[in-house]
Image: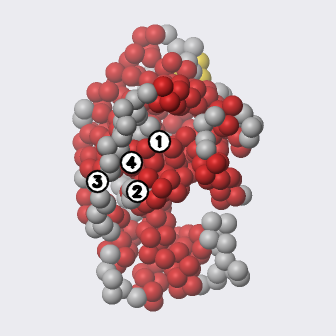
Amino acid sequence: MKNWINRLRGGTDNPPAAAAAAPDAADEQAADLAADIEATYYRWLTAAHGYAAPAEVETRILDEVRQLAAQPGKAAGLVPRVPEAIPALLSSLNDEDASVSELARQVAQDVVLVAEVIREANSAYYRPISPVKNVEAAIMMLGQNGLRMLLARIAFRPLVNMQADGFARAAAPRVWTQSISCALAASLMAPGLSTGVFEAYLAGLMQNVGLVVAFRLADRTGTDGKVPGASSFGAQLLAGSRQLSSAIAAHWSFPEEVVNAIAHAGAPGSDHLAEALGLGDRIAKLRLLIDAGVLGEDDKLVADGLDNFQRRCLGKLARLEA
């Protein structure tokens, strides 16, 4: 796990982010807006499975999440391993002398990777003039960083879409969609904040691993696939699961800045990577809520929550999903 994370990162270093300004009225307004988005997202996520849980049930689940965050080795044991085909490819990506044909040869050894790479090259994100039909052309279209992001996404898919029962299984597809949307949105926010594009993408993929684990813990309360549906509980669960994700990332020797970004995403005074992740997370959640018909494109949460560039990113996520 530690080796493939280093290979994913590619050994690049980023300059330290500048210190953020002290909290002010704008920060407080942003925090209130973020809380409204979180509450709306949690209500949508649990709409068909939420119930009015007794306070003691909510407390027990939250306590278990906090305790697990303090035992990252145990928490990591609840998460599937990364596919074996990924590390060798990542090593080749870090080799500047590796040719496109060599990368294509390695990709071709796994039929799933072949399909994923060609599909990605033909996606709305890259918009090729003519359809890409072979692996070498697909790799040239994606480039080294694009291929690294794709491999990260493939590696993380079983971590979020893990085989589980109850609500964790029902929620996993939506949580995974939010994860990949967040990763892309955060990577688009990163250049404007002078922080690492791939680190932002990696943090976006990782941040929901703890949430799926938390849902598995909630399923153990014996509520037949139900989960506490109160917004107040949801806010605490989302915050606690973020700390759980951060703890697992630290246990896996993720870059320190990624670990910290997950723990502090969207918090006032956070560094630039955490800011990019927080914005990406917000944009991705709004995209899901709009696509589900919960919010309109002109809803106050969208209008007040995003600037012009962020709205363009919101639109890009829609085109990507289409």
| Separation (CA) of disc 4 from disc 3 | 9 Å
Q: Is residue 199 above or below residue 259?
A: below
Mark 4 or mark 2: name the one nearer the start of the chain: 2
Q: Which residue is mark 2?
A: 194
Q: Which mark is residue 272?
A: 4
SS at badge 4: helix
Whichever of labels 1 and 4 marks the residue nearer the N terminus, that label is 4
- The disc labelled 1 sits on which kind of residue? Gly
User: What distance separates the C-alpha of mark 3 from that of mark 1?
Assistant: 18 Å
Give the mark toward the camera: 3 or 1.
3
Cα–Cα gap, marks 3 and 2: 9 Å
Residue pointed to by mark 3 = 16
In this image, 310 relative to 237: left or right?
A: right
Of the two numbered discs 3 and 2 on the same chain, state the one appearing first in sequence. 3
Spatial CA span between label 4 and label 2: 7 Å
Specify few, some or many for label 2: CA neighbours under 10 Å numbering under 14, 14-19, or 20 or more. some
Secondary element type, mark 3: loop
Task: Say which of 77 and 33 sits in front.
Answer: 33
In the rendered structure, which amino acid carries the disc numbered 2? Ser
Quadrant of the image containing the N terminus:
bottom left
Residue at 42% of width from left, 10% of height from top? 56
